[in-house]
Image: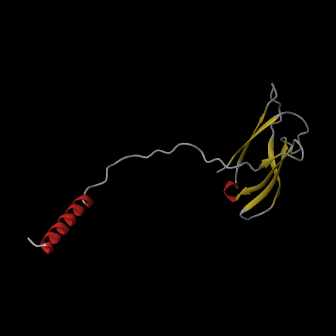
Amino acid sequence: MSVKGISVVTGLFFLWAGACAAAQTAGQGTIYFTGAIVEPGCATNARSGAVMELTGCAISSRGSHFDVRNMAPVASINAAHVKLVADSGAGRYYDQRYLLVDNAGKPIQSGNYVITMTSP
């Protein structure tokens, strides 16, 4: 057999082996992802205890949900919540200012509260 014949037979063998490997079906399975994406925080309360500012936040965190929890041993009758008082508008990054207020809308002057911000 000549070199040309051996080359043709070898080429056909590799072509056949490649076709057989490509014909195999992929196996079934499930991939699970767990964890959280953690970005540097953009919330501060540098002005006073009742004011919370979001500075330089990514647009993806716009529409965050806030939960306020009173840390007093006996919960007060007036529940606290945050009120948006300033917003820098649309853009890649944004700034917002929130004020901790009671149900009447008056700023809370004293007490210990934990504010939890949950981003979408």
Identity of the residue drawn at 46% across and 44% down: 32
Furthest residue in direction bottom, as rendered = 4
Residue 116: give x, y in percent of width and height. 73, 41
Observer-nearest residue: 22 or 80?
22
Residue name at image x 61 percent, y 48 percent: 37
**Residue 8 appears in which quarter of the rendering?**
bottom left
Q: Quadrant of the N terminus?
A: bottom left
> What is the x, y in percent for residue 46?
87, 46
Front in this rendered view, residue 32 or 113: 32
The residue at 84%/43% (across/down) is 100
Q: Residue at x 81, y 39 (%)?
A: 80
How many marks are shown on the rendered structure? Answer: 0
Residue placed furthest toward the top: 73
Q: How is the image coloured?
A: secondary structure
Vertical position of residue 74 compared to residue 53: above or below: above
Q: Is residue 2 left or right of residue 50?
A: left
List x then y, in percent, for residue 105: 86, 45
Residue extending farthest to the left is 1
Vertical placement of residue 79 versus 85, above or below: above
Q: Quadrant of residue 61?
A: bottom right
Q: Nearer the viewer, residue 96 or 37?
A: 37
Q: Position of 92 compared to 15: left or right?
A: right
Q: Position of residue 57 (x, y in %)?
A: 73, 55
